[in-house]
Image (tube, rainbow, N blue to C red):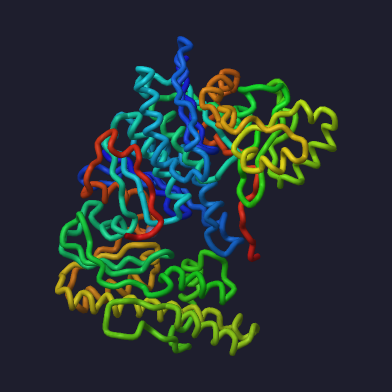
């Protein structure tokens, strides 16, 4: 089975995992940190490049592993809408994967705290142990997160490694509270589209209308009546 | 055949149109009621809903046209102006569909699509003509010399006509969207009962509706709650008459100034019954031919996007992969 993995929760990420096990990815670079508002311009060109590198046509893709966030709402929807269009074109399956699960899947440490910058001084995150999700995806301010970790994990907290752009953004807050953050240059801070592909192998395909971002936050709207 | 996709505001739309401009299907999934309790379109809610229904809406448009994806030669999508988060749903889906099928793609300007909507159907309009486009987001007059482009003759300086309807409806305690509510209520009222201001100052072709909205606000305040409720139909009728007359007066000036013999309307306000009959009467009086598209071609729709795409450059694969949406008119 040929898998295409795409993620737009943070930077634009695309990878192909060919049926023969060969992987085609482009490692994340430091240049990809910061606000990401260019998914519309970057995503399809990245997908086209990965397919060309893998020697595949669009019609050769059997399943699309799509990162459903959490992350910037507009960016996530560009990724999901792109996946819907690609899947519709040739009947490929859509397999949703949490971008946090992908962040937690690779790198050192058994107890991992993937964190994605949620803006407004908050973090999106979840807790994983050996790939098993222990905490539901949440949005929280760093100080609230730190006190939850201390209350609920106690001694265990020393085994924990925080990863993701959110952990870099609030590195000082986390480290001064005794939490370990993966080294700044580590590849484990970027969501890996290849990790999405690997996780997607055990994910059931969904219909386009069931492909919904992991929003975590409610929309800002005020009812007038 | 052309598959068109439009998600610039709160309607998720897909349509199939032939190269000759015949509408094979025109699917509109309206979110109107979803935004009702907020009194207007909430961008984030609109974008969430677009994503949830874009797949089924495209399937529906193909099925109603009796077409397969293999029958589609070109994919067209609105790239702006509109709500950026909403636009990006339709545009991203369209780009991906086109890319995966290696089809050419056309990025369509939403406003231009409204202007040339009357080029669709069995009796297409021919340039040169003047078009009045009025909706919740835009109100302007345009001259069309060739279908590829239009020249803006005048535009609203403040609110759009549809916005004036929505705000008026709110002052009268009517639900959102206000246009259809005022239209319905106005038919029971006296349009001469209240004297509301008609148009923007000056001799140009620009519009202004903020003074009218303020006049209604004062009228409602002076009447008080009970009297306003009693006279709601008269207020609605007078208010609607003022909007329609402001639109018609500028349209008439444009027709005379531009010396055209053909006139078209577009935009959601084009569904207003008083405006439709007013334009017919104006056509008779000035001796010009009038094109009034059906309701589903006036309000936001994808058939007009696919139709307008016939006159725009086709981008070949892979030149459109990096195409982005834009929020504001250039
Ligand atoms: Zn419109």
Query: Is B56 left or right of B247, judged from the image as shown?
Result: right
**Residue B299, can we see it?**
no
Q: Quadrant of ligand 1?
A: bottom left
Quadrant where the C terminus of chain A is found in the figure: bottom right
Counting from the top left corner in percent of width and height, residue B74 is at 27, 38
Query: Is A160 left or right of B137, judged from the image as shown?
Result: right
Query: Is B288 left or right of A62, judged from the image as shown?
Result: left
Locate residue B267: give its quadrant: bottom left
Nearest to the observer: residue B32 or residue B288: B32
Counting from the top left corner in percent of width and height, residue B245 is at 35, 80
Query: Is B130 left or right of B38, judged from the image as shown?
Result: left
Identify whether B157 is placed above or below B266. below
Locate residue B286: give its quadrant: bottom left
Counting from the top left corner in percent of width and height, residue B12 is at 45, 48
What residue is at 19 percent from the left and 65 percent from the top? B129
Nearest to the observer: residue A58 or residue B232: A58
Nearest to the observer: residue B1 or residue B163: B163
Counting from the top left corner in percent of width and height, residue A191 is at 56, 31
**Residue A194, can we see it?**
yes
What residue is at 26 percent from the left and 38 percent from the top? B1
What residue is at 72 percent from the left and 38 percent from the top? A175
Query: Total of numbered circles in the picture?
Result: 0
Identify whether B199 is placed above or below A201. below
């Amino acid at each position: 089975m040929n898998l295409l993995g795409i993620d737009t929760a943070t930077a634009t990420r695309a990878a192909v995992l060919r049926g023969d096990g060969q992987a085609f990815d482009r490692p994340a670079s430091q240049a990809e940190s910061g606000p990401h508002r260019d998914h519309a311009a970057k995503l399809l060109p990245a997908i086209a490049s990965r397919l060309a590198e893998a020697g595949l046509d669009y019609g050769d893709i059997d399943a699309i592993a799509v990162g459903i966030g959490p992350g910037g709402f507009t960016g996530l929807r560009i990724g999901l809408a792109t996946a819907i269009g690609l899947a519709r074109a040739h009947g490929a399956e859509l397999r949703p994967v949490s971008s946090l699960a992908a962040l937690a899947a690779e790198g050192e440490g058994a107890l991992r705290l993937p964190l994605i910058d949620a803006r407004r001084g908050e973090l999106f995150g979840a807790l994983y142990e050996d790939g098993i999700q222990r905490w539901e995806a949440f949005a929280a301010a760093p100080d609230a997160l730190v006190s939850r970790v201390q209350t609920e994990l106690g001694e265990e907290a020393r085994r924990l490694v925080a990863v993701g752009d959110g952990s870099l953004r609030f590195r000082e807050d986390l480290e001064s509270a005794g939490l370990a953050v993966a080294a700044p240059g580590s590849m484990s801070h970027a969501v890996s589209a290849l990790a999405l592909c690997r996780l997607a192998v055990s994910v059931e395909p969904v219909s386009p209308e069931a492909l919904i971002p992991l929003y975590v936050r409610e929309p800002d709207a005020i009812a007038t009546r | 055949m052309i598959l068109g996709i439009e998600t610039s505001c709160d309607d998720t739309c897909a349509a199939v149109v032939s190269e000759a401009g015949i509408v094979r299907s025109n699917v509109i999934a309206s979110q109107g009621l979803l935004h009702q309790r907020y009194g207007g379109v909430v961008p984030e809610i609109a974008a969430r809903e677009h994503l949830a229904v874009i797949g089924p809406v495209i399937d529906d448009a193909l099925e109603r046209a009796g077409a397969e994806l293999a029958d589609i030669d070109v994919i067209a999508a609105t790239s702006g102006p509109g709500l950026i988060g909403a636009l990006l749903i339709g545009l991203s889906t369209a780009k991906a569909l086109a890319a995966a099928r290696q089809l050419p793609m056309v990025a369509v300007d939403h406003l231009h699509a409204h202007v040339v909507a009357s080029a669709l159907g069995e009796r297409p309009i021919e340039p040169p003509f003047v078009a009045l486009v009025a909706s919740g987001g835009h109100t302007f007059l345009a001259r069309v010399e060739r279908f590829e482009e239009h020249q803006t003759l005048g535009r609203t300086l403040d609110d759009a006509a549809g916005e004036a309807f929505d705000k008026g409806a709110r002052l009268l305690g009517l639900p959102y969207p206000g246009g259809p509510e005022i239209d319905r209520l106005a038919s029971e009222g006296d349009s001469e009962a209240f004297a509301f201001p008609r148009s923007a100052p000056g001799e140009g072709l620009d519009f202004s509706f903020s003074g009218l909205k303020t006049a209604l606000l004062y009228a409602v305040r002076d009447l008080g709650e009970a009297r306003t409720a009693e006279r709601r139909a008269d207020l609605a009728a007078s208010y609607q008459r003022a909007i329609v007359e402001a639109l018609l007066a500028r349209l008439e000036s444009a027709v005379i100034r531009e010396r055209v013999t053909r006139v078209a309307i577009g935009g959601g306000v084009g569904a207003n019954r008083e405006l439709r009959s007013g334009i017919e009467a104006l056509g008779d009086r000035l001796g010009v031919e009038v094109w009034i598209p059906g309701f589903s071609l006036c309000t936001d729709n994808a058939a007009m996007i696919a139709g307008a795409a016939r006159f725009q450059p086709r981008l070949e694969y892979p030149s459109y992969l990096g195409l982005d949406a834009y929020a504001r008119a250039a």
